Amino acid sequence: MQYNKVELCGVNTSKIKVLKEDEKKRLLEIIKTGTPSERSRAREEMINGNLRLVLSVIQKFTNRGENLDDLFQVGCIGLIKAIDNFDSSLDVRFSTYGVPMIIGEVRRYLRDSNYIRVSRSVRDTAYKAMQVKERLQSENGREPTVEEIAKELDIPKENVVLALEAIVEPVSLYEPVFNDGSDTIYVMDQVGDNNDDTNWLEEIAIKEAIAGLSDREKKILAMRFYKGKTQMEVAGEIGISQAQVSRIEKNALEKIKKQAD
């Protein structure tokens, strides 16, 4: 999608004004302290000046087969909520707060229009939990715990977990999550294996091949396949990046496979 060739909801996106950061701060301050007429004008200008932000977000959802006009309108709702709820006293860029709000609104729309239905009560709990999560994250500058969200809602933390899990879309194990230019890390690389009965290294039983590996390679394979740790956990314990863990692991397995052939 190119900005200069897109028209959504009657809006020529090539003519969308993009506000500078100091302009956003000025408008947000007027929205907070101005007269009713000033707040109304500033709010409208703030909305129009951030439509490009909405456009950039909905491009992430263009492969869902949804109508782009619908997604754009839903994204605008998220933008308006972000403007109305943004705390200008915090040292945070508006886009840092606005993008998750827009994404959340689009995801809610997609979930509600999905053929797999979740009960209304569970959805309501999940949406309230997401709103509390966004607010606590904005107030504290960090990701809130499940316990903190549950305390705010005055419900058991198990209910929060179940509600949020119920509206999470399934993710492919082969979806890429990181690429450093040479090796790609997929979701499946971050999943640990706690099933000792099906340990891959025990099944291949090639002691000579494993003995030929370096100490670091042996340690990483042992942590990954014997202890069932994720690459992220291994990286944290050894003190290297996850990309390095992935590369070493793959190289070690290739060595074993070659000697097994």
Image (cartoon, grey):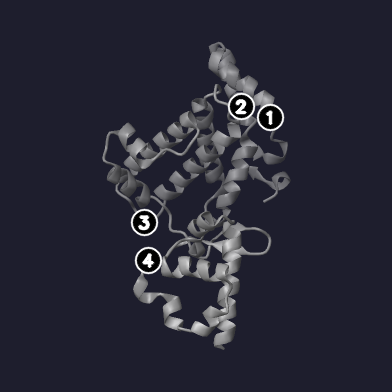
Q: Closer to the N terminus: mark 2 or mark 3?
A: 2
Q: Closer to the N terminus: mark 2 or mark 4?
A: 2
Q: CA distance from mark 2 to mark 4?
A: 50 Å
Mark sitting on residue 155: none
| Nearer to us: label 4 or label 3 | 4
Q: Amino acid at mark 1?
A: Leu
Q: Closer to the N terminus: mark 1 or mark 3?
A: 1
Q: Which residue is mark 4?
A: 194
Q: Which residue is mark 3?
A: 116
Q: Residues within 10 Å of mark 3 (few under 14, many from 20)?
A: few
Q: Can residue 9 be seen in the rendering of this structure?
A: no
* Picture residue at 62% right of the left edge, 44% below the top: 56
Q: Closer to the N terminus: mark 1 or mark 4?
A: 1
Q: Can residue 35 be seen in the rendering of this structure?
A: yes
Q: Which residue is mark 2?
A: 46
Q: Residues within 10 Å of mark 2 (few under 14, many from 20)?
A: many
Q: Quadrant of the C terminus?
A: bottom right
Q: Is 184 left or right of 205, judged from the image as shown? A: right
Q: Which residue is mark 1?
A: 19
Q: Amino acid at mark 3?
A: Ile
In the rendered structure, are the residues bearing label 1 and label 2 in contact, judged by CB atoms less than 8 Å apart?
yes
Q: CA distance from mark 1 to mark 3?
A: 39 Å
In the rendered structure, are the residues bearing label 1 and label 4 in contact, judged by CB atoms less than 8 Å apart?
no
User: Under tag 3, what secondary structure?
Assistant: loop
In the rendered structure, are the residues bearing label 1 and label 3 in contact, judged by CB atoms less than 8 Å apart?
no
Q: Position of residue 221 (x, y in %)?
A: 50, 70
Which image quadrant for residue 28?
Answer: top right
